[in-house]
Image (cartoon, grey):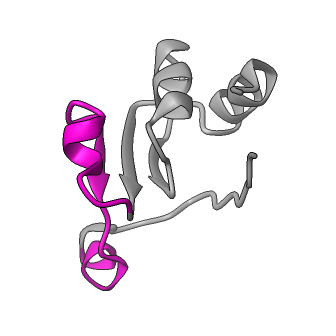
Amino acid sequence: MIDRGLAGALARLFAGRSVAGLGDGRGEYRRLILSTGLTTHYDAYDGAPNIYNITGGQVTISLLRLLWAGIVLVVVSACVQVQ
């Protein structure tokens, strides 16, 4: 179940910024946050095997030891667990 209110609140929190989402699953929150037009960019990552194919390329497999080399600057950090 997707919490649309939470997605809207996160979109406002990230307004005008690029987002790197870790543990993004199938990318539902990515889609909702991007649909607001408030964020400039959203890269979604998840550790599930074959996640790139499952999501049609919307979510990329994450190998955290390699991922950090591509993140230059983090302005805001938020940790949210949704079940």
Residue 77 locus on image (x, y percent): 64, 61
- Work out whether residue 76 or residue 59 is closer to the camera in this orientation and state it: 59
**Residue 78 image position (x, y, % from top left):** 69, 57
**Is 61 included in the stretch rendered in magenta?**
yes
Q: Is residue 36 left or right of residue 52?
A: right
Q: On the picture, is 6 further left or further right than 78? A: right
Residue 62 lies in the magenta-colored region:
yes
The residue lying at 49 percent from left, 40 percent from top is 17
In the displayed structure, 41 sits above or below 52; it is above
Q: Where residue 7 appears, x then y in whole percent? A: 68, 28
Residue located at (49% from left, 48% from top): 24
The mark total stands at: 0
Residue that protrudes farthest toward the bottom in the picture: 65
Residue 78 vertical placement versus 53 (above, below): below
Residue positioned 76% across, 29% down in the render: 9
**Apparent side of residue 11 relative to residue 51 in the rendered image (left or right):** right
**Residue 1 lies in quadrant:** top right
Which of 50/21 is in front? 50
Q: Which residues are magenta?
A: 48-69
Q: In front: 23, or 14?
A: 23
Image coordinates of residue 3 in percent, x first then y, are: 76, 26
Q: Residue at x 73, y 54 (%)?
A: 80
Q: Quadrant of residue 49?
A: bottom left
> Taking 35 as reference, is 13 above or below it?
below
